Image (cartoon, helix red, strand yellow):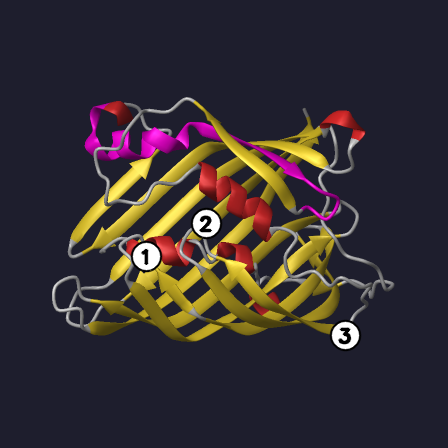
Amino acid sequence: MKWLLSLLVFSLAPFCGALHAQDSNLEDVQEELPALLLPKFELGKTYRFISTTDVYMTPPGESPRQIRIEQQARYDVDPLSGGRKGVALRGLTEKLKVDIQAGGKSVTYDSLEKGNQNTTIGRHFESTVNRYVKMELNERLKIMSHKEAGRSAGATPLPGLPRFGPEELVQIINAIPQGYSPDPVKTGDEWVLKGKRPVGDLGDLGFEISYKNLGLMKYEEHACIVIEFRGQMSGDITNDNSRNVEFQGSRINGSILFDPQLGMTRYSEHSVSMIVYIPDSETKEKRAVPMQQKAVLKLMQVKKK
């Protein structure tokens, strides 16, 4: 149960991505014409992203818990078989760093460090980090199918600790097209997206998020359209032990930076704040645990394969 919250929060990434414009040293460039904004993967190219998630929680009467996951992901783009519209992606993890601090103890892992197979924590994460995912996406980047494959290190020696790799590769692709308006927009336009989304294998969450197009701004010498958003989530989560995890006050806010020339999200960041009610494993009494998450997705590189 001690690791459930890390899985819960990390699974929220597909809802949105954000960067507060006032914190990014962005400068106004010019207002763009109304346009349909939608990321796209170009055939024959390789895309590299860095995904970073920070989770901070403060269980009552216990020391704070902090989790940081940094994953460098690579996606190679190919055409779909049979001349179908869309793209095929082959995603793999090129680098993974995990830092978990809880109860005065620290757990760290770096996939680039030598000797991971000689440590218990190393063998745990190596069991999935070296696997890759094949995905088929339609024209709106919706995943139609995905299949995990590649080298596996076998069963983990730490079954209670989360593993990261293939599932997160899928989550990154799920996150990229979300938040964009289904209609052409211009500076100042607003729209609302609401409905339900699955959160891993834990169940469905309702969401209602308001977006606003802030116009063209400069980010790392690139003219990007900034979309600001805020909203809420609702629902119950059921963990793998069939215990409900209730939450309230789930506030989401952030922004998306879209490069219209490249046709891809260059940077996204979101913050989530909530109170989670977790049943005690022995007494079954629920405890209120404040929790915050900050997730960042940054495009590192696009080049021909």
Along the horizontal axis of the image, is 198 left or right of 248? right
- Where residue 301 appears, as percent x and y from the top left, is 63, 37
In the depicted view, which residue is nearer to us: 7 or 262? 7
- What residue is pinned by disc 2? 52
* Residue at image point 73% right, 26% down: 81
- Where residue 129 appears, as percent x and y from the top left, is 40, 32
Q: Answer above or below: position of 153 versus 209.
A: above
**Outermost residue, bottom side:** 249
Q: Nearer the viewer, mark 3 or mark 1?
A: 1
N-terminal label among 3 and 1: 3
Q: What element carries label 1?
A: loop
Q: Residues within 10 Å of mark 3 (few under 14, many from 20)?
A: few
Specify the quadrant that holds the C terminus: top right
Q: Is mark 3 on a helix, strand or loop?
A: loop
Q: Answer above or below: position of 82 versus 227.
A: above
N-terminal label among 1 and 2: 2
In the depicted view, which residue is nearer to us: 70 or 2? 2
Along the horizontal axis of the image, is 206 left or right of 69? right
- Range of residues picked out in magenta: 118-141
